[in-house]
């Protein structure tokens, strides 16, 4: 244990509270995990946690008692917890974690990758990361315009899947285009999810090295990325439905790929 902190004016508290904003996260290269479930998943996955905060009044939650002797724990007052939480009702525990992202070049040989291009909703990003982790995707790449991976809403939406699959966030379209050009030149098929045109998801041979790109909720994949792709892939649908939510569409495509790739 590392003592206790009761004042919201404490410099460390101000530093932690700064992680609720993107600027603070980028400057400190740290982010917050709120709630028992996320913190437990992080501990189980050996995520590099700097500090674990718990309520002086409520104590360390029962689910986390296996780690109660961890010297990174700090007891804090309820006002301090509230200052470090994005939710209206402060969580029982908050952890400060270090950002750990793969290097882009390390993904060049990854055979199965999900790429999000301009997906703005944190819930959609979280769902796609969960689906990617569920089917065993090698990595997830978030291109420019995507919701911030380390924003509290996005982290919560991953439900801990963030710790199960490598996720890289790129800020420039040129970086993503260059990466896709490199993998395609090495023989990997780059597939762009589209409403129509190209091949149906059943006609694609997902057993090949495949990078799937899904796009913005309204405008789809950006033209620069489409220009790099091997082909479009779409989900055949009957009835009056014109399209699916981007996270749902990504999940459907990933599970067809998973079905085929199980034979590898």
Image (spheres, grey):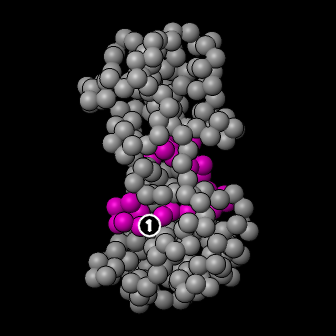
SS class of the residue under badge 1? loop
For residue 174, which quarter of the picture?
bottom right
Say which of 250 and 263 sits in front: 263
* Residue 141 makes an appearance in the image: yes
The x, y position of residue 29, in whole percent, is 62, 40
Residue drawn at point x = 36 percent, y = 26 percent: 70
Query: How far across and how far down the image is residue 158, in percent?
Result: 43, 49
Q: Is residue 196 positioned above or below 106 on the image?
A: below
For image coordinates 26% across by 29% down, the residue present is 66
**Mark 1 neighbour density, 10 Å: few (under 14) some (14–19) many (20 or more):** some
Residue situated in front as seen by the camera: 253 or 244? 253
Q: Quadrant of the N terminus?
A: top left
Q: On screen, 73 above or below 10? A: below
Q: Position of residue 150 (x, y in %)?
A: 56, 44
The residue under the point 70% across, 66% down is: 175
Which residue is under mark 1?
A: 138
In the displayed structure, does residue 132 sit left or right of residue 64? right
Is the C terminus in the top left, top right, bottom left or bottom right quadrant? bottom left
Using the rendered image of the protein, determine whether residue 116 is visible from the camera's viewpoint: no
Q: Quadrant of residue 165?
A: bottom left
> What residue is rendered at 40% in x and 23% in y?
71
The percent coordinates of residue 98 (x first, y second) are 54, 40
**Is 4 left or right of 182, judged from the image as shown?**
left
Residue 104, magenta (yes or no): no
Camera-nearest residue between 71 and 36: 71
Extent of the magenta region: 131-157
């Amino acid at each position: 244990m590392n003592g206790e902190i009761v004042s919201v004016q404490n410099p460390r508290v101000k530093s932690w509270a700064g992680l609720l904003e993107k600027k603070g996260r980028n400057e400190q290269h740290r982010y917050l995990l709120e709630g028992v479930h996320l913190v437990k998943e992080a501990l189980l996955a050996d995520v590099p946690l700097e500090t674990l905060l718990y309520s002086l009044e409520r104590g360390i939650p029962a689910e986390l008692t296996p780690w109660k002797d961890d010297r990174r724990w700090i007891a804090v007052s309820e006002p301090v917890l509230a200052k470090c939480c994005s939710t209206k009702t402060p969580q029982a525990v908050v952890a400060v974690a270090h950002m750990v992202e793969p290097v882009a070049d390390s993904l060049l040989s990854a055979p199965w990758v999900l790429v999000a291009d301009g997906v703005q909703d944190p819930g959609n990003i979280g769902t796609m990361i969960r689906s990617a982790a569920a089917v065993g995707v090698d990595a997830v790449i978030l291109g420019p315009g995507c919701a911030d991976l380390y924003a509290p809403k996005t982290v919560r939406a991953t439900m801990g899947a963030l710790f199960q699959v490598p996720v890289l966030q790129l800020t420039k379209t040129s970086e993503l285009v260059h990466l896709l050009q490199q993998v395609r030149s090495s023989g990997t098929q780059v597939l762009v999810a589209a409403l129509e045109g190209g091949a149906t998801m059943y006609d694609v041979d997902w057993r090949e090295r495949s990078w799937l790109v899904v796009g913005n909720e309204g405008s789809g994949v950006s033209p620069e990325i489409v220009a790099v792709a091997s082909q479009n892939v779409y989900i055949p649908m009957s009835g009056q439905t014109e399209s699916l939510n981007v996270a749902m569409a990504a999940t459907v495509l990933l599970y067809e790929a998973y079905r085929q790739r199980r034979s590898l």
